[in-house]
Image: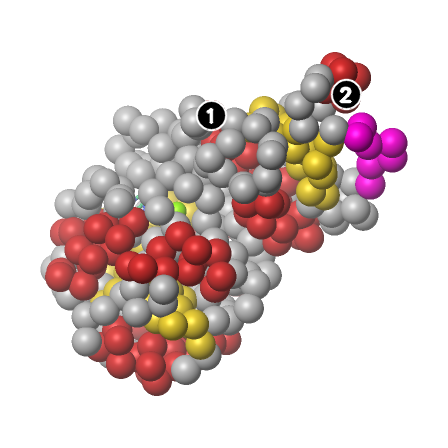
């Protein structure tokens, strides 16, 4: 198992020596390596069992530092970065030669993120290179929101996990392509559509997920699997109650009269969508190792962070296990 701690110097040391370190961010934990070091980056793909066609996001401490490995940043991007960096957002930008092709799966663009978690901010400030970091989970599985989640699934694949407590946002960053006038969202996440449109003063496009979409190479439709079949939609309590099996329910809002054969994880009793996002991946993991063989999840209102939560639940439901 990996060592878990809060020692930034240990994390720096490992990263400088080409090793993997799991880092806390406000969205989810990332599996980090020196983005300029091909061999170190290759370790990420191996540890996650990630296909090489799925590009990685590169993280650094401030948007000022981004120009050292990207080019042609336009006004839309600067406007959004000024409002939302550091934060739960990733920009797709043209890369320079300094970023190895392995990081971007051969694409000429690179995803760039400035996380706002204080521990990781300090770490990134101290490093002379940016770090490539996907979510720190085996490929296709639920993202980790605590150091313990990382240790459970990848603990034997890395020497150190920097523990920054539970991730406060709880869903991954929103991925934006602002390279053209018509700004596109490639993945919904911690920054909402509404917030983006407010800053730009106009509508943005939501790109539909497709594994063959060249703009969103790794955004495979089935993902975020807890390893237990999940059904999304209004819960048919009456017919479930008649079943002889125990089933899992992922609910939003306080439930009265839960059937005896239901195991509940409530995302937010008070229907607070921020709380629901922060609890989402913990909720999906909650049923693992229990007698539950089927999970039923309620859809949230399709607005604000609710959109990103519904997106993750839809993908979890699309996974055949
Ligand atoms: O919040 C987050 O974004 C977390 C934390 C650790 O920063 N990271 C994360 O990384 O979610 P990952 O690898 O699990 O998801 C990154 C997504 C992938 O679906 C990938 O296809 C897409 O970003 N991506 C990366 N580079 C891209 C590029 N150049 N063009 C289009 N999509 C890209
Ligand atoms: Mg991921």
CA gap between label 1 and label 2 equals 24 Å
The residue at label 2 has a CB less than 8 Å from ligand 2:
no
The segment highlighted magenta reads 254-260
- Report the side of 321 relative to 48 (left or right): right
Coordinates of residue 231 in the picture (x, y in percent):
58, 24
When the figure is inspected, residue 202 is found, relative to residue 145, above or below; the finding is above
Q: Splitting the image into 4 quarters, where does residue 139 fall?
A: top left
Which residue has dot 1 on it?
318
**Residue 184 visible in the picture:** no
Coordinates of residue 233 in the picture (x, y in percent):
65, 24
- Going from the N terminus, do you reach mark 1 or mark 2 first? 2
Q: Number of callouts in the render?
A: 2
Which residue has dot 2 on it?
241
Q: What label does residue 116 carry, if any?
A: none
Specify few, some or many for label 1: CA neighbours under 10 Å numbering under 14, 14-19, or 20 or more. some
Q: Is residue 256 magenta?
A: yes
Q: Residue at x 46, y 39 (%)?
A: 224
Q: Residue at x 49, y 38 (%)?
A: 226
């Amino acid at each position: 198992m990996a060592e878990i701690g809060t020692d930034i110097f240990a994390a720096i040391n490992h990263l400088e020596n080409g090793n993997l370190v799991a880092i806390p961010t406000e969205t989810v934990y990332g599996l980090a390596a020196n983005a300029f070091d091909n061999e170190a980056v290759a370790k990420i793909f191996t540890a996650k069992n990630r296909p090489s066609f799925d590009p990685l996001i590169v993280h650094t401490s401030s948007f000022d530092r981004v120009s050292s490995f990207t080019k042609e940043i336009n006004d839309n991007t600067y406007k959004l970065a000024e409002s939302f960096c550091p934060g739960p957002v990733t920009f797709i930008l043209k890369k320079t030669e300094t970023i190895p092709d392995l990081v971007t799966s051969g694409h000429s663009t690179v995803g760039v993120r400035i996380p706002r978690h204080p521990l990781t901010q300090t770490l990134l400030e101290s490093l002379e290179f940016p770090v490539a970091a996907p979510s720190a989970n085996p490929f296709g599985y639920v993202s980790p929101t605590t150091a313990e989640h990382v240790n459970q699934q990848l603990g034997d694949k890395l020497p150190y996990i920097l523990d920054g407590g539970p991730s406060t946002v709880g869903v991954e960053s929103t991925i934006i392509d602002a390279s053209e006038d018509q700004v596109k969202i490639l993945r919904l996440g911690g920054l909402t559509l509404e917030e983006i449109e407010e800053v730009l003063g106009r509508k943005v496009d939501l790109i539909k997920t497709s594994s063959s979409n060249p703009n969103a190479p790794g955004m495979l439709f089935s993902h975020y699997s807890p390893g237990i079949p999940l059904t999304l939609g209004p819960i048919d309590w009456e017919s479930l109650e008649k079943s002889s099996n125990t089933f899992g329910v992922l609910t939003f809002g306080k439930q009265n009269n839960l059937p005896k054969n239901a195991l509940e994880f409530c995302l937010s009793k008070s229907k607070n969508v921020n709380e629901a996002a922060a609890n989402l991946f913990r909720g999906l993991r909650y049923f693992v190792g229990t007698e539950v063989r089927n999970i039923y999840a309620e859809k949230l209102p399709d607005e604000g962070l609710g959109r990103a939560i519904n997106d993750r639940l839809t993908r979890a439901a699309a996974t055949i296990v």
